Image: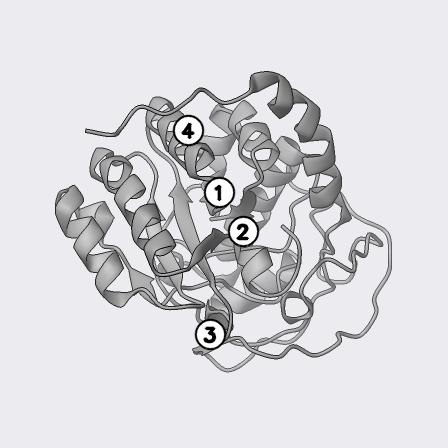
């Protein structure tokens, strides 16, 4: 059973959401760039991206910040890791020299379970990244506010979670853009974090679709918990802890009771090894 945890400070959450939204709004949504060769890469040193500026456009739902293929927002933040502002292959891990590990969650499923996950993270001071499915986020928009206000990062996991490799460019672009609009509607900006649905790695079509929506990189992972198969909490803990390393990006899923039960033990294992649960943005060198 999940150990009891203290309730989150809801007043603090309300006070913090404004600053959380400011961070999300400050992130760059870059201009479209050409597709790159397929593959995943680990991230170490980053390069300074070329500067871009133009006016934001409205997305499919009329939400500012979802750019067309020829425009980008003028909101530039020094906190954004340069690696996210330049085109390149999928990012599957971060620098191995530090102590950060990025726990990333597929954002969908039972809302009560999601709240319990947020409570478990709060109890241990852990920060994570939630790649939200747009339909889930739009059905419960307050969750986006809660996630960001608690210090976590919110990314785009497409609108309806199709197997993205099966879609053509137009349909894939629509999925990514509508997902971006859902994130923007929840927290004020679509941000820089995107993970394709139904595949651990992108394709040239997916990268072109992501680029058209303002995302230069896809965020993959190098440690799959396999929690979506519901193998039980012990199996999730074993799979994750056996492969933990500095710079790891771990794939997890909200809405699975076994993941919820396993989470405190995973966080304890991180602490025992001197590792910290941080957001993808923090792992790659910026502020979430």
Residue 48, above or below 157:
below
Question: Do tag 2 and tag 1 residues touch (Cβ < 8 Å)?
Answer: yes
| Secondary structure beneath label 2 | helix
Percent coordinates x, y for residue 86 in the rendering? 67, 72
Q: Which mark is residue 119?
A: 4
| Secondary structure beneath label 4 | helix
Percent coordinates x, y for residue 135 in the rendering? 46, 33
**Res. 167 image quadrant:** bottom left
Mark 4 residue crowding within 10 angstroms, few (<14) / some (14–19) / many (20+): some
Residue 75, above or below 215:
above
Question: Do tag 3 and tag 4 residues touch (Cβ < 8 Å)?
Answer: no
How far apart are the two marked residues, 2 and 3, measured between alpha carbons?
Answer: 30 Å
| Secondary structure beneath label 1 | loop
State which tag comes first along the sequence, 3 or 4: 3
Question: Do tag 4 and tag 1 residues touch (Cβ < 8 Å)?
Answer: no
How far apart are the two marked residues, 3 and 4, measured between alpha carbons?
Answer: 28 Å
Residue ranking furthest to the top: 11
Q: Which mark is residue 176?
A: 2
Disc 1: which residue: 159
Residue 266, above or below 183:
below
């Amino acid at each position: 059973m999940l150990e009891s945890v203290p309730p989150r400070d809801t007043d603090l959450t309300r006070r913090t959401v404004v600053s959380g939204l400011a961070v999300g709004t400050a992130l760059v949504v870059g201009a479209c760039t050409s597709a790159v060769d397929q593959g995943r890469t680990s991230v170490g040193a980053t390069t300074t991206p070329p500067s871009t500026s133009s006016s934001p456009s409205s997305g499919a739902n009329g939400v500012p910040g979802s750019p067309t293929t020829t425009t980008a927002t003028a909101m530039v933040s020094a906190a954004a890791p340069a690696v996210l502002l330049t085109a390149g292959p999928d990012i599957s891990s971060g620098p191995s020299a530090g102590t950060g590990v990025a726990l990333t969650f597929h954002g969908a499923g039972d809302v009560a379970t999601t709240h319990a996950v947020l409570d478990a993270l709060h109890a241990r001071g852990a920060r994570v990244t939630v790649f939200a499915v747009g339909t889930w986020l739009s059905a419960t928009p307050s969750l986006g506010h809660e996630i960001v206000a608690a210090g976590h990062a919110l990314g785009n996991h497409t609108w309806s979670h199709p197997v993205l490799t099966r879609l053509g460019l137009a349909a894939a672009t629509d999925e990514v853009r509508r997902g971006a609009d859902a994130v923007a509607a929840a927290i004020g900006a679509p941000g820089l974090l995107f993970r394709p649905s139904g595949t651990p790695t992108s394709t040239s079509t997916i990268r072109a679709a992501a680029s058209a929506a303002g995302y230069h990189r896809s965020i993959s992972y190098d440690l799959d918990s396999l929690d979506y198969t519901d193998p039980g909490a012990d199996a999730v803990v074993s799979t994750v802890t056996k492969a933990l390393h500095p710079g790891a990006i771990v794939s997890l899923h909200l809405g699975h009771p076994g993941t919820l039960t396993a989470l405190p033990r995973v966080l304890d294992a991180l602490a025992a090894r001197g590792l910290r649960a941080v957001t993808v943005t923090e792992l790659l060198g910026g502020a979430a």
